[in-house]
Amino acid sequence: MNMLGRVLPKVFINLERRRRVCLALAPKEGALHEYLSTPLPNKDTAVGKMTILSLDFETTGLNAVQDQLLSIGCVDIANGKIKLGSGHHQVIRTLGQLKKDNVVIHKITDAEKERGAELKEAIDQLLRLMAGKVVLVHYAKVERNFLREACLQIYGMVPPVLMIDTLAITKRRLDRHSIPYDPSRLRLMHLRNNFGLPNYNAHNALKDAIATAELLLAELQTHHKGLRTSLRKLL
């Protein structure tokens, strides 16, 4: 493994500088090169003028080092609208049998995951979908850590990613106004209920990506300047 993959995120704070350094070190062709060849969005740009990729992972557990990435779901938000036609869902062929309690949650069976894509194929495709976009998630620790480990395993480095976290946005707002809250109320379903958004069956990666996209748009209209809100305000 290229140890620069572990050093770069700590040494280079500026994401755009990190992108250029990673580009110089990456292979000259392939999905990683394509992703790194595209500049990251400007943080001062209004979110209504950029494309956001709402992303969700389903995993075999919460430890990104020990557990595996099981499925990827994502959808674009462009010009303040969710582009359902851009929706992407990919099951990944994990190693070993799935635990019964895990299958109960995500509804992906051993037979289904055996028909899934290899991890490299899935991450290559994801990086191509992420190129030039801001990534949107709910509870960034899961997606950031699993994406980091997958990239280290496949490419030997971690490409920089601009990531909006709807959980962090809500937490900052509540903390700023000294509003007490139960941490469990920061779950995606509960926050959607606060805005009167419909309930979806959780733990399907594409459905959760769409649900997160809807939550961001509701948050923007209620507590921010709508689509005129700068990306910087959301990071």
Image (cartoon, grey):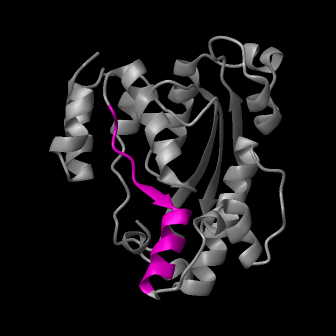
Q: Which residue appears at 72% of the width and 77% of the height?
A: 194
Residue 85 visible in image: no
Left or right, 193 with reference to 69: right
Query: x, y percentage for residue 229?
Result: 47, 79
Whether residue 7 is situated above or below residue 14 in the rendered picture: above
Left or right, 86 with reference to 198: left
Q: Is the C terminus in the top left, top right, bottom left or bottom right quadrant?
A: bottom left
What residue span does the magenta drawing correspond to?
Answer: 158-176
Query: x, y percentage for residue 25?
Result: 22, 26
Residue 10 visible in image: yes
Whether residue 33 is situated above or below residue 51 in the rendered picture: above
Q: Which residue appears at 20% of the width and 51% of the height?
A: 13
**Residue 231 image-quadrant placement:** bottom left
- Count every numbered label the image shows and give the total: 0
Q: Is the N terminus in the top left, top right, bottom left or bottom right quadrant?
A: top left
Q: Which residue appears at 40% of the width and 53% of the height?
A: 162
Q: Which residue appears at 55% of the width and 26% of the height?
A: 67
Whether residue 197 is situated above or below residue 137 in the rendered picture: below
Query: x, y percentage for residue 177?
Result: 47, 88
Query: x, y percentage for residue 98?
Result: 72, 20
| Residue furthest to the left | 11
Left or right, 87 with reference to 157: right
Q: Does the magenta stretch include residue 28?
A: no
